Amino acid sequence: MYRHFPTRDALLEAVYRTEVERLAAAQQKFAETMPPVEALRAWMLLFVDYIAAKADYRAGTEYARRWSVKTVRRYLRMGR
């Protein structure tokens, strides 16, 4: 499992770093290609998915996670 990483913590750190770098790259792309409000909405939807994936690992029921994600997405799409 840890073929390229000396410890589990090192593996988790690498995964986390990669995910955060993807979020940052998406922000840059959105900022360059969309109006500011649309770029913010697009990035926040991406971030909601990222957080929802993290929540799956930790706690809650599937129902609670889906309800939260749907609520946030609906809110972010308001005004379109």
Image: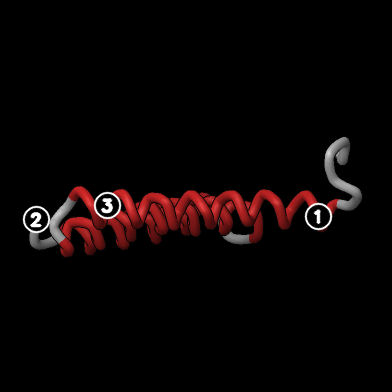
Closest to the camera, between mark 1 and mark 2, is 1
Amino acid residing under circle 3: Phe
The mark that comes first in sequence, 1 or 3, is 1
| Residue 44, percent from left and from top | 33, 60
- Residue 37 vs 26, above or below: the answer is below
In this rendering, position of residue 17 left or right of residue 22: right
Location of the N terminus by quadrant is top right
In three-dimensional space, the C-alpha distance between marks 3 and 2, rounded to whole angstroms, equals: 16 Å
The residue that label 1 is drawn on is 10
In depth, the one of 44 and 31 nearer the eye is: 31
The residue that label 2 is drawn on is 80
Which residue, as the protein is rendered here, is positioned at the far left? Answer: 79
Q: Residue at horizontal 87%, vertical 36%? A: 3
In depth, the one of 76 and 58 nearer the eye is: 76
Closest to the camera, between mark 3 and mark 2, is 3
Amino acid residing under circle 2: Arg
- Mark 2: few, some, or many residues within 10 Å (few <14, many ≥20)? few
Contact between marks 3 and 2 (CB within 8 A): the answer is: no
In three-dimensional space, the C-alpha distance between marks 1 and 3, rounded to whole angstroms, equals: 30 Å
Quarter-of-image position of residue 48: bottom left
Question: Under tag 2, what secondary structure?
Answer: loop
What number is the disc on residue 30?
Answer: 3
- Mark 1: few, some, or many residues within 10 Å (few <14, many ≥20)? few
